[in-house]
Amino acid sequence: MKKYVAILAAVCLAFGVSACGSSSSSSASGSAAASASASASSSASSSGETETSEGERTTFVVGFDAEYPPYGYMDDNGEYTGFDLELAQAVCDIEGWELVKTPINWDSKDMELNSGSIDCIWNGFTMNGREDDYTFSIPYVDNSQVIVVSEDSGINSLEDLSGKIVGVQAASAALTLLQSDEEGGQKALADTFASLQEFPDYNSAFVELQAGSIDAVAMDIGVANYQLKTRGEGYKILDEALNTEQYAVGFKKGNTELCDIVNKDLEELTNNGTVAELAEKYDISDLVCLEAE
Amino acid sequence: MSFSTMLMQLSSGMVKTTGIFFWTIILSLPLGLFVSFGRMSKNPVLKNIVKIYISLMRGTPLMLQLMMVYYFPYLLFGMNIRTFRFPAIIIGFTINYAAYFAEIFRSGIESMPVGQYEAAKLLGYSKSQTFIKIILPQVIKRILPSITNEVITLVKDTSLAFSLAYMEMFTVAKQIVAKDATFTPFIVAAVFYYVFNFVVAFVMEHFEKKLSYYR
């Protein structure tokens, strides 16, 4: 019996150690949950600085949805990348911060931000309609919410969606828009749908669209372009958009100090051409709304 | 993404999955034993507190419990939880699984005939000696199949850590699916889980054979 206990203890220890070891080493490869713990000591002090002085900040923890290409996703090498993350990296390069990429569960973004787990949400984050809940940077992308349908569905306009089943990502801006009856909201349109189906991610939505169990998916135009490019033929984006809106970096309400620094850097990056360069790389040049002076 | 990179990424996720698995097993089995003592206690206060605990743990979704554990220090004390993600996952899984294990232990312990306690007392065994030397070895033998059930469930439940955005295998698989728009990562993940559980079942069967010394 003692022998078994010893073997079990050894195995457990080995796994425990390897689990810890991997979490510190994989921070380099961008696994952010782990790097959050790896940078435990530094972030513990920097979180205090959020309230006091930004001058001593050493890390910049960006929360993002890693299932949101082209703004934040896992690239071919398994590293987290995307337009927004590279822009955040550029800001960190200017300020001399270490960028910590923390993938978050989009449903819990408020909790992650308010509890100090992340410094900001930087991931195709729509500012319109959320102004009261966050402190936003200057908008950097002109986005619009669009409808994607199958090419042979016969749906060509928003009116055609009457009586159809429309999919949308849970907790997304598209969902908020379709539920809003304020000015600019599309609740009236949503009321003509047979139903509004919420999905945890776009992959499930597209599979159901392909399988025919839903008729359309509402999403951000940048994401729609990426999905259509990746998935090939068979889909189209309706010409009529649901709205136009802007992306900005979302900070915890009242954190203007950090926001001002990022704003200043965004202007600098626009003027020196970095933003345009990145926009071209991720094929969203016509969406970026920052203009060099 | 090439297939080999995908395997690499999923393997690194698998390491984290096994991390959750082993930490939970190491912590929840002993805790479960102590909870079962509380559940069988003659003290009505302790007994009822433990009953409520087990009832809550079994009666609410594990995903909800994980989120509660993670956000609890912030919601109640306004603490910074930046470094709390992994500990929260382990605590969440442990307290949940300890409740299930406690009931399994209880079923085993209560199934032992009273005659054995009486005989042990007659032979001069103390209470703790009776439990450790006579009762517990037989209990372990009896409950092993039920424990195997729970352990295998745990392997699959580790995927719930995605709700706290921990980069275990399922979370990674979802991210690759989002990027590549194919289902391949899910199939690979399924194979990983199956192989892991196959090994778990094999090891547990080996233990069962080792312990069936009277048959």
Image (spheres, coloured by chain):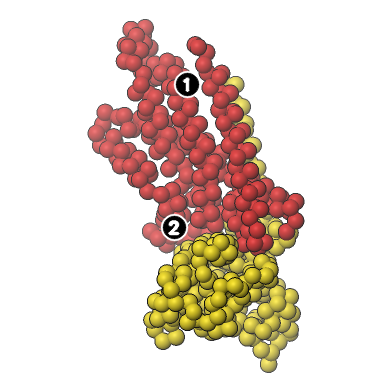
Q: Is residue B121 visible?
A: no
- B7 above or below B204? below
As shown in the figure, which amino acid type bears the numbered disc 1?
Lys
Question: In the displayed structure, would residue A55 be above or below residue A14?
Answer: below
Nearer the observer, disc 1 or disc 2? Answer: 1
**Which mark is on residue A93?**
none
Q: Where is the N terminus of chain A found, in terms of image quarters?
A: top right
Q: Is residue B110 left or right of residue A56?
A: left
Residue occupied by mark 2: B71
**Figure chain in yellow:** A
Choose top left, top right, bottom left or bottom right for residue B79: bottom left
Q: Nearer the viewer, residue A79 or A120?
A: A79
Q: Which of the 4 image quadrants contains residue A46? A: bottom right
Distance of mark 1 from mark 2, alpha carbons?
A: 39 Å
The structure residue drawn at horizontal position 54% and vertical position 49%, both measured from the top left corner, is B159
Residue B42 percent location from the top left of the image: 26, 28
Can you say whether A269 is above or below A72 in the image?
A: below
Quick one: label 1 or label 2, which is nearer the N terminus?
2
Q: Position of residue B126 (x, y in %)?
A: 37, 15
Chain B palette colour: red
Question: Can marks 1 and 2 be said to lie on one chain?
Answer: yes
Residue beneath disc 1 = B141
Badge 2, how many Cα within 10 Å: few under 14, some, many 20+?
A: many
Determine whether, in the image, residue B107 is placed left or right of residue A279. left
